[in-house]
Image: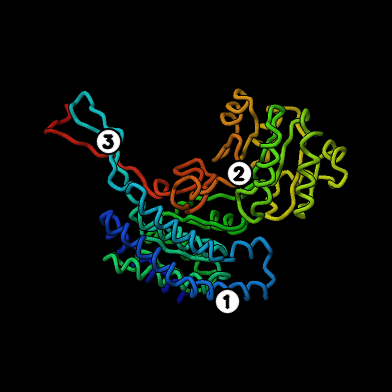
Amino acid sequence: MSNLKDYFNTLGKAARSASRVMAKASTAAKNQALLNIAQAIRENAAQLTAANELDMARARANQLEPALLDRLSLSAKAIETMAQGLEQIAQLPDPIGEISNMRIRPSGIQIGQMRVPLGVIGIIYEARPNVTADAAGLCIKSGNAAILRGGSEAIECNRALALLVGQGLAAAGLPETAVQVIDTTDRAVVGAMVTSPEYVDVIVPRGGKGLIERISAEARVPVIKHLDGICHVYIDSDADLEKAIRIADNAKTHRYGTCNTMETLLVASAVAAAVLPPLADIYTKKGVELRGCEATRRILKQAIEATEEDWKTEYLAPVLSIRIVADVDAAIEHINHYSSQHTDSIVTENYSRAMQFIREVDSSSVMINASTRFADGFEYGLGAEIGISTDKFHARGPVGLDGLTSLKYVVFGHGEIRQ
């Protein structure tokens, strides 16, 4: 452990030094670094694919769950999406140095708030190699340094990406150590990372509930976190049923292993008999296991009995719980009781109910007539995301550039003194 602590201290000192350079880096230099990295990712796609195949082979040998294998896989489309995400970040306005909320006080001084970097961001994540590129890009553009600790499952791919990121930074005249990937699979290094406030200003964990609970318990550094993605779609009695079927299908079956996938479908009793059978046909053909309340099972004979545990479970698998509710009030009550405050959606043509839903559902993203799968930094126009926060302090929802900054007060005077 002492060697690991020394190793992390070396990373931490380099990151702290790099963060001071990044805080004053020009927008042009940061954008050039992002474009350099995007180009390198495209040019080295074959090497990234080969590294990912090594990771996938090891993961299959270790019998990883299908949801983790899905997150670990890096297709040609995913590689191109990484490059596009970096280019999109480069096109976004630079938040650093922006002054807002200016006002003049009776004393004559002017007060405003300036957006500034957080400093050094430690990011701990499992499986997904695309997080390495997304996190690097967001931290670079927001003027931060980053220490990335990817899962052991993706170590080969993360090493390959780290090399490309470092080269892109150096070619733009920025320190390669502005983004460092921890090059060990020893989990003890996480303990050193989350207990080093002298080097790390904030921790962002992305992974399973066990990982996030451990980090939250051990950390001496502030944590931006989300625990589960227990997302809901509610089909209202005034829904367009064709629209509802399309949304409920996509929200569940587009991808099973993501945190914005629907895990519970709520249906108003007035339309349940009309909308559930065609939906069940779709789900059955796609191999989705249905678990329903008593009213649901009267309509869908293939559904098995849902338990209390089902309403509070993030399956990350082709399993869906279904509950028939009386109305929008009952749907909101269910969601606010069982939701992880990630993403919830209503399908309705009733304006009043739609507005009630988005006012009263206490989640980080609340939607009207849209699939929960849109709760994503890339889809929100953030370029990418460093995570989806279900916290209520500092950052909530997909955490993009602004979520990686803070505000400080700035005062402009003309010689005023306090009387």
Q: Which of disc 1 and disc 3 is earlier in sequence?
A: 1
Quick check: 282 above or below 134?
above
Callout 1 secondary element: helix
Q: Measure the C-alpha gap from mark 2 to mark 3.
A: 36 Å
Q: Report the side of 241 relative to 362 (left or right).
A: right
Q: Are marks 2 and 1 in contact (CB under 8 Å)?
A: no
Q: In the rendered structure, which amino acid carries the disc numbered 2?
A: Thr
Left or right: 95, with 309 as reference point: left
- The residue that mark 1 highlights is 54
Q: Are marks 2 and 3 in contact (CB under 8 Å)?
A: no
Task: Check disc 3 and report its element: helix, strand or loop.
Answer: strand
Seen at 21% across and 32% down, the residue is 110
- Sequence-wise, which precedes: disc 2 or disc 1? 1
Q: Is residue 196 visible?
A: yes
Measured as percent of width and height from the top left, residue 162 is found at: 43, 70
Q: Which dot marks residue 112?
A: 3
Using the numbered discs, state the Cα–Cα distance from disc 3 to disc 1 in whole angstroms: 52 Å
Q: Mark 2 highlights which residue?
A: 372
Front-most of 194 and 241? Answer: 241
Residue at x 79% of width, y 45% of height: 280
Give coordinates of residue 59: x percent, y percent: 63, 72
Residue 195 visible (yes or no):
no
At label 1, which amino acid type do we have? Leu
Residue 355 image point, x, y percent: 58, 27
Q: Nearer the viewer, residue 127 or 130?
A: 130
> Which residue is at 30% across, 66% downward?
175
Instruction: Quote the CA–CA distance across marks 2 and 1.
Output: 32 Å
